[in-house]
Image (cartoon, rainbow, N blue to C red):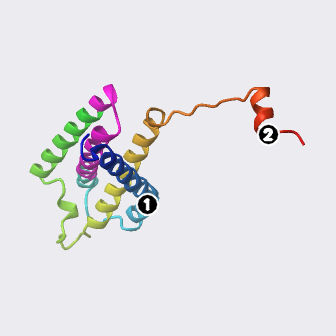
Amino acid sequence: MPGGGTAKMIVLMALVRRSGLFLVSYAPLAAMFVAAKWPTGWSSTELALLAMWVVGVASLLVLPVASAFFTRGRRKQALAMASLAAGAVTAVGAYLGWYEPAAWQAPANATHATTAAIAFGLCIAGIEIALVILLNARQTSQLYWRTPTPETRAARWPVI
């Protein structure tokens, strides 16, 4: 690419990877916050719908980037389809108000689930990024083990 476009893309991919690994490292802390800030006063159905909506939002943030930068072929198509499904879940959930437990103003008999929802979203995003990294590890950097022959071993490490 003229103007150093390839170098810019390599730097961008490195930044995305590093940001993803940073998020993955904080996924256990996010899980702790989900447990510590568990909302009360909401039905299990409302919390399950909130969880589905948060999974949709987190997937909508992770999967398109993974599809665009880190995959090829069928994996790219699968991640693109999963992105579309996450977008559909997010849109339906927003339309039907599945995010209500995470509103800033909770009803009088309930606690707001904003902190738990954000922490759950970070946990889901961290898990998805870790899966993308693990599934694509072979594609991005195959490891070749070269066993030296006796001649090359003698040339590299002479016996004293």
- Horizontal and vertical percent for residue 133? 43, 42
Along the line of sight, the residue nearer the viewer: 41 or 31: 31
CA distance for labels 2 and 1: 43 Å
Magenta: main secondary structure equals: helix
Query: Does 74 appear in magenta?
Result: yes
| Residue 27 horizontal side relative to residue 75, left or right | right
Could you tell which of marks 2 and 1 lies nearer the N-terminus?
Answer: 1
Name the residue at the right extreme.
160
Which residue range is magenta in the image? 51-78
- Residue that carries the numbered disc 1 in the rendered image: 26
- Residue that carries the numbered disc 2 in the rendered image: 157
Q: Check disc 2 and give the amino acid type.
A: Trp
User: Is residue 37 shown above or below 142?
Assistant: below
Along the line of sight, the residue nearer the viewer: 109 or 46: 46
Q: Check disc 1 and give the amino acid type.
A: Tyr
| Residue 37 horizontal side relative to residue 28, left or right | left
Residue at the spot 25% in from the left edge and 61% down from the top edge: 42
| Residue 139 horizontal side relative to residue 5, left or right | right
- Horizontal and vertical percent for residue 22? 42, 58
Corner quadrant of residue 149: top right
Residue at the spot 13% in from the left edge and 52% down from the top edge: 94
Query: Does 37 appear in magenta?
Result: no
Residue at the spot 24% in from the left edge and 34% down from the top edge: 80
User: Is residue 92 shown above or below 135?
Assistant: below
- Horizontal and vertical percent for residue 82? 26, 36
Mark linked to residue 75: none
Q: Element at badge 1? A: loop
Residue at the spot 33% in from the left edge and 47% down from the top edge: 7
Image quarter of the C terminus: top right
- Horizontal and vertical percent for residue 49? 23, 50
